[in-house]
Amino acid sequence: MASYGTIGIIGAMEEEIKLLLEHMDNPQAEQHAGLTYHRGTLHGRKVVVTQSGVGKVNAAVCTQVLIDRFSADAVLFTGVAGAVDPALNIGDIVISTSSLQHDVDVTALGFKRGEVPYQAVSEYPSDEALVKLAQAAGENVFPGRCRTGRVLSGDQFIADRAVVRMLHEELGGACTEMEGAAVAQVCHMNGVPHVIIRSMSDKADGSAHVNFAEFTVEAADRSFAIVSGMVQEL
């Protein structure tokens, strides 16, 4: 396992970073680009925890600041997502092997769905060592509920069963959310290892109004447990 001086940890929503902030030692808040970054230690490791806000632009800005201002050597993105693989259930954990922007669509010009035109890489691989570490941490706290897969990101809250089917069958997605691939792209461009850890809060099938709010806190708790376990081992 590589040695990381500073670990950047991002959550999109308040619920996703609340527990991390409560467990940090000597947190100090700084403002950059309209976002608050909390520098401190977690399990004796130097971390910077921040809430990116929702969507790919917020996530990209947040990640670049973590790298430029705080010299993050690795980035962990934690939070909730909607399951698109029918084998996944609410409460299951997906650890990214890679991520792709499902709302990039230049198929009219001959590009594949999700392919960013004239760019060498459009699917961003997660760091293998961080993936294995996340798997181990996940199995330790939630045995049998963690799996790896492709995370799909787009500036859309998916609630249409037909779209869910397409995201799984055509793009091979395990889950869908609104930030991960942007974090991954920025990390890839900067040569910084990353992994995305998502807990399923809904099935992305139109029933989110029933279960999203109820399971968001529970799912965020699961994500925190895994990230906390990872930091202990880094």
Image (cartoon, rainbow, N blue to C red):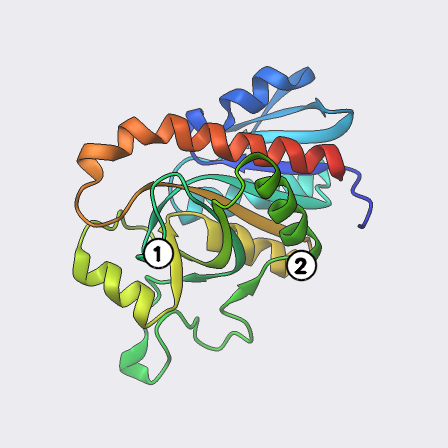
How far is disc 1 from disc 2 in space, using C-alphas? Answer: 23 Å
Quarter of the image where one finds residue 69: top right
> Pointer 2: what residue?
128
Quarter of the image where one finds residue 80: top left
Q: Which numbered disc, 1 or 2, marks the residue that appears first in the sequence?
A: 1
Quarter of the image where one finds residue 22: top right
Bin the neighbour count of mark 1 within 10 Å (Cα to Cα): few under 14, some 14-19, many 20 and up: few
Where in the figure is residue 18, as x and y percent of width and height?
A: 50, 21
| Residue under the image location 66 percent in, 17 percent down | 28
Visible residue check, residue 186: yes
Q: Which mark is residue 39?
A: none
- Looking at the picture, does residue 153 appear above or below residue 114? above
| Residue under the image location 32 percent in, 56 percent down | 84
Q: Nearer the viewer, residue 177 or 234?
A: 234
**Front of the two marks 1 and 2:** 1
Q: Check disc 2 and give the amino acid type.
A: Glu
> Pointer 1: what residue?
87
- Looking at the picture, does residue 161 appear above or below residue 62? below
Q: Check disc 1 and give the amino acid type.
A: Ala
Q: Secondary structure at mark 1?
A: loop
Where in the figure is residue 94, as x and y percent of width and height?
A: 47, 49
| Quadrant (top left/top right/bottom left/bottom right) for the C terminus | top right
From the viewer's perspective, tell me whether residue 146 is left or right of residue 231: left
Residue furthest toward the front?
Answer: 144
Residue furthest toward the right?
Answer: 3
| Residue under the image location 42 percent in, 35 percent down | 53
Q: Secondary structure at mark 2?
A: helix
- Looking at the picture, does residue 103 appear above or below residue 42? below
